[in-house]
Image: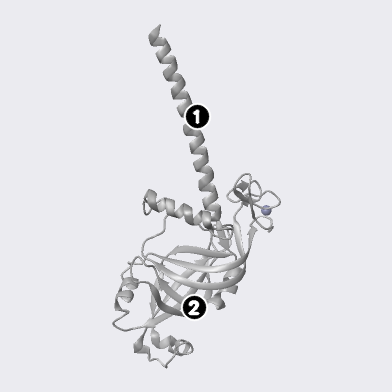
Amino acid sequence: MRVEKAKSLSVKALNPADDIGLINLLSIRQLGPDEVYCFSVVMCDNDVDRDLERFTDRTLEDLAPMFVGKTVISDHRWSSGGQIARIYATEVKTGTENNSAGVPLKQLICRAYMLNNETNKATIEAIEGGILKEVSVSCAVGQHNCSLCGEPMEINWSTFTYECKNHHQKGETYPGEGLCVVLLEDAKDAFELSFVAVPAQRNAGVTKSAENLDDAFDVLLSCTDLSDHPKFGELLQHMQKSTMKAAEREERQKILTENKKFIQKHERM
Ligand SMILES: [Zn+2]
């Protein structure tokens, strides 16, 4: 199952001379320290994210080596897109504080390099100048498990919520057990890291025109199976809310019509 997670950008420039040996293990030709620009980025961590999911420490440890050699790509909104850098080292760092799940915060941090030339000048300036606001990590995990009992979480089709066989629901708090979140476990693959210029906030962002929305529905309806997509649960919940809103609208309309009838009748009397 493909997982994509966004995180606000925390980037630090590094001294290329310290890492040139590691970089040359990946580069096609031997590079000198003055030819490269190096930086470190916090890719993801073990904290509960806005989807009420979190990577376990084990998943972060397993993902770390999978990301070495993978590319850093750019968001199409701020450049022509494509590969901008390559990851040459990764590590899991333990912080001094606890995360919201009450365990020590761990971050997966990568070090990446790009050629320090005219072509990349704008990109380097964008990174250092804070134009890039978020990074998005893309990987695959084999299991979505319940944080309270460890059982697999699955979509409950009658309530459109993620639920384990012990009926723990994602986002619900259980007395004595705590908040149920989804644990992302069994790291399978690492794809890439991307830089995003505009934060992908929920409910904020671009207003879609009706024409585009029709296109979007056509694309969705042409898919034979959507259930593997990381936003599938979100889409289901959104549809459920929309259905409820439509029912409410109908109910309100009924009341208004009856009121009108009552008033008209009253006026005639
Ligand atoms: Zn459970």
At numbered mark 1, what does the secondary structure look like: helix, strand or loop? helix
Residue 70 marker? 2
**Tag 2: amino acid:** Lys
Q: Give the quarter of the image for residue 263.
A: top left
Q: Which residue is mark 1?
A: 251
What residue do we see at 51% from left, 71% from top?
Answer: 108
Q: Earlier in the sequence, mark 1 or mark 2?
A: 2
Q: Amino acid at mark 1?
A: Glu
Q: In the displayed orientation, state which residue is furthest to the top.
A: 269
Quadrant for the C terminus, please: top left
Q: Residue at x 42, y 73 (%)?
A: 73
Pinpoint residue 142: horizontal percent, then vertical percent. Answer: 63, 66
- Of the pair 210 and 160, the residue shown nearer to us: 210
Q: x and y percent of residue 54 in the render? A: 56, 61
Give the image location of residue 81, x and y in percent: 37, 72
Residue found at the far right of this picture? 166
Mark 2 nearby-residue class (10 Å; few <14, some 14–19, many ≥20): some
Q: Residues within 10 Å of mark 1 (few under 14, many from 20)?
A: few
Could you tell me which quadrant the N terminus lies in? bottom right
Rendered position, 23 above or below 39: below
Observer-nearest of 150 and 261: 261
